[in-house]
Image (cartoon, rainbow, N blue to C red):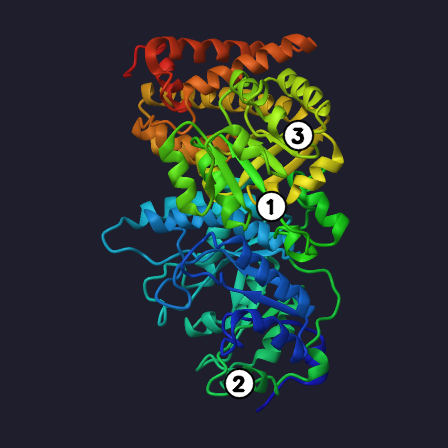
């Protein structure tokens, strides 16, 4: 087979796509096979075609396989549906597939970050019969903006790829200019500049494009290159493409990034298809990679005890429960409070392999826990008696005090040396007092309220704000990492609650601002959906607007987080601010609006129902 000369090959940095090569092997064996063939870098399509959010154990296993093989993951696709298969992406498909893409964004970004991967590919998706292409393009831009922001937070490039029309007739991006136009729209919407063109020479050749002209025009806009020969999509030398010359031209035009081998091995084992490439050229040389010319987003390099810092301290992010690898037995857990948040959180600990005994006053919630594999207790005392860790998740300070104190409470019945983690949202002073009382009983305490709502609890992607001592935080870290994605020790006892209070202040003010904008836009006669989409693509964009947009558009105020609870939280933050002498001029007004909405009988609605308060004040529909 004709091949690359040693000199020509040595100028490139090749990686192997493990989703098209070595597929004759199980997924977890492929990284080692690539290493045995002489390669030091690999890329992947999203390996779990049936789910955007695979179990953590499966993510851990793939991460370990890549690390153990000693190869670098340099590229990863976001969830793209059945690929290989009929699908060509999910992000522009209305309905369930688009939601699956959105659910995958943070999961894929975190997995990539854990392995030092700085390129995330987002396939656009096929046209859907009966759906207006403009509607799909609008949805695609919204989801690409979301993906670009997630990539930016880990210092990564977002890649947009053109496929070929003969093999993907319903895929809309079938030329280099079409893909680059999408790149430009994303960069314009985000202002980040981290969207880049993925130049696949095989697909562009199949489209009949002038490859030297494409390289001349777009090399500087390219974040990744992939190759296969044409015709046939085989190894270099099996077709007629002058791949060595084309890659040389790319280098002349300044491209120094990776070249992914994305060809089909045919009827031979993949390891036998690299004879075109001298073995000495398969290990990647060291050079600055193409990609975003900016450091990781500060949200991913926070000071303090975040998971990002743990990565720098330990070399890589440990996504699995450390007890798995260290051999230390998992602690027995008692869980008190199985409500909207507590039920899915406790179930996620069961899924992670913990022995969880739960107590609540509602039998149906206990039945749900036992169905998930946990154990039901008949009282707090029974639940906590043999527990190493006790976790509480109840509505407010009075409930925490009720379950913690007294002869039937946690402090009188938990054993000395137990760790009590209160994940409720309560006043900072209640947390400080609880820690002091527990200390007298030999019980350690962390306050660890969460943000992310019911969806975050179900998907185990919560943000967890912790107050307490470092040693206790380290002891609890594996548990936190089974429940959430962002875990930070914020300071001494009460600090987690203080940060949670600030979170609730920000969320309430943000919802109020969004609600006022919605009423303003509607009374001005503007297309509301279009307006919110473009606002969310710019500096006004926020997680609140992303998650609550449909609530506003559809007037859907079914409770995710109730006004009643946000009213309680606004009381916490205003009281705490008063105690430290901090002025909250806007926050106090929003707190009054929340209280007013509650007084009018809307306390059971979702907090996005702040829109109803603005509508009442504006004489608009309610």
Q: Which numbered disc covers residue 152?
A: 1
Which residue: 53% across, 12% down?
A: 571
From mark 3 to mark 2, how far is it between C-alphas?
Answer: 54 Å
Question: Residue at the location (55% across, 47% down)?
Answer: 354
User: Closer to the camera, 528 or 559?
Assistant: 559
Secondary structure of the residue carrying tag 2 is: loop
Where residue 593 appears, as percent x and y from the top left, is 44, 11
Give the residue number, with chain letter if any, for mark 2: 269
User: Is the residue under label 2 in contact with that under label 1 (CB below 8 Å)?
Assistant: no
- The residue drawn where x is 47% and y is 15% is 567
Whether tag 3 and tag 2 are in contact, CB under 8 A, the answer is: no
Q: Is residue 290 above or below residue 310?
A: below
Element type at marker 1? helix
Q: Residues within 10 Å of mark 1 (few under 14, many from 20)?
A: many
Q: State the image coordinates of residue 198 (x, y, percent, origin top left).
A: 53, 61
**Quick check: 190 left or right of 429?**
left
Q: Which comes sooner in the sequence, label 1 or label 2? A: 1
Is residue 303 something one can see in this rendering? no
Q: Earlier in the sequence, mark 3 or mark 2?
A: 2
Q: Please name whichever residue, 395 or 384, is drawn nearer the observer in this view of the structure.
A: 384
In this picture, is 576 found above or below 489?
above
């Amino acid at each position: 087979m004709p091949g690359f000369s040693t000199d020509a090959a040595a100028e490139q940095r090749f990686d192997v796509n493990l989703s098209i090569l070595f597929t004759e092997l199980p997924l977890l064996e492929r990284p080692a096979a690539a290493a045995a063939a002489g390669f030091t870098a690999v890329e992947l399509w999203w390996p779990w075609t049936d789910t955007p959010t695979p179990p953590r154990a499966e993510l851990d296993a793939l991460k370990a396989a890549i690390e153990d093989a000693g190869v670098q993951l340099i590229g990863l696709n976001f969830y793209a549906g059945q690929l290989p298969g009929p699908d060509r992406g999910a992000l522009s498909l209305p309905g369930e597939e688009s939601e699956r893409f959105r659910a995958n964004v943070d999961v894929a970004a975190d997995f990539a970050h854990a392995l030092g991967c700085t390129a995330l590919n987002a396939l656009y998706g096929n046209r859907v019969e009966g759906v207006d292409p403009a509607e799909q393009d609008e949805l695609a831009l919204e989801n690409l903006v979301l993906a670009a922001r997630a990539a930016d937070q880990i210092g990564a490039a977002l890649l947009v790829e053109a496929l070929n029309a003969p093999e993907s007739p319903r895929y809309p991006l079938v030329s280099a200019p079409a893909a680059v136009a999408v790149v430009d729209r994303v960069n314009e919407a985000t202002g980040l500049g981290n969207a880049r063109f993925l130049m696949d020479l095989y697909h562009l050749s199949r489209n009949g494009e002038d490859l030297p002209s494409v390289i001349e025009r777009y090399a500087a806009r390219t974040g990744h290159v992939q190759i296969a020969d044409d015709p046939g999509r085989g190894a270099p030398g099996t077709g007629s493409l002058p791949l060595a010359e084309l890659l040389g031209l790319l280098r002349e035009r300044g491209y120094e990034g990776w070249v992914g081998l994305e060809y089909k091995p045919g009827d031979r084992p993949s390891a036998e298809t690299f004879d075109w490439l001298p073995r000495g050229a398969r290990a990647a040389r060291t050079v600055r990679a193409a990609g975003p010319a900016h450091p990781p987003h500060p949200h991913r390099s926070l000071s303090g005890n975040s998971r990002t810092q743990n990565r720098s301290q330990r070399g890589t992010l440990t996504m699995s429960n450390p007890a798995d690898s260290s051999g230390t037995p998992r602690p027995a857990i008692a869980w008190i409070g199985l409500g909207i948040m507590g039920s899915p959180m406790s179930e996620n600990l069961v899924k992670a392999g913990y022995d969880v005994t739960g107590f609540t006053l509602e039998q149906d919630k206990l039945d749900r826990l036992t169905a998930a594999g946990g154990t039901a207790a008949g009282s707090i005392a029974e639940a906590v008696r043999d527990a190493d860790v006790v976790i509480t998740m109840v509505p407010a300070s009075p409930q925490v005090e009720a379950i913690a104190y007294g002869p039937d409470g946690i402090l009188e019945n938990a054993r000395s040396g137990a760790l009590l983690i209160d994940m409720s949202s309560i006043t900072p002073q209640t947390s400080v007092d609880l820690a002091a009382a527990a200390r007298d009983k030999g019980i350690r305490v962390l306050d660890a309220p969460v943000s992310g709502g019911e969806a975050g609890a179900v998907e185990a992607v919560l943000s967890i704000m912790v107050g307490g001592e470092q040693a206790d935080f380290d002891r609890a870290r594996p548990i936190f990492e089974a429940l959430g994605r962002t875990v930070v020790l914020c300071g001494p006892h009460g600090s987690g609650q203080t940060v949670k209070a600030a979170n609730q202040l920000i969320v309430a003010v943000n919802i109020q601002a969004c609600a006022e904008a919605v009423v303003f836009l509607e009374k001005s006669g503007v297309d509301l959906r279009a307006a919110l989409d473009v606002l969310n693509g710019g500096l006004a964009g926020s997680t609140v607007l992303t998650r609550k947009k449909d609530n506003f558009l559809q007037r859907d105020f079914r409770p995710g987080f109730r006004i009643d609870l946000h009213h309680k939280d606004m009381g916490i933050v205003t009281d705490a601010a008063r105690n430290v002498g901090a002025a909250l001029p806007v926050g106090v007004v929003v707190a009054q609006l929340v209280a007013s909405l509650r007084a009018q009988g809307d306390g059971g609605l979702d907090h996005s129902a702040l829109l109803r308060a603005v509508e009442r004040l504006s004489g608009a529909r309610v």
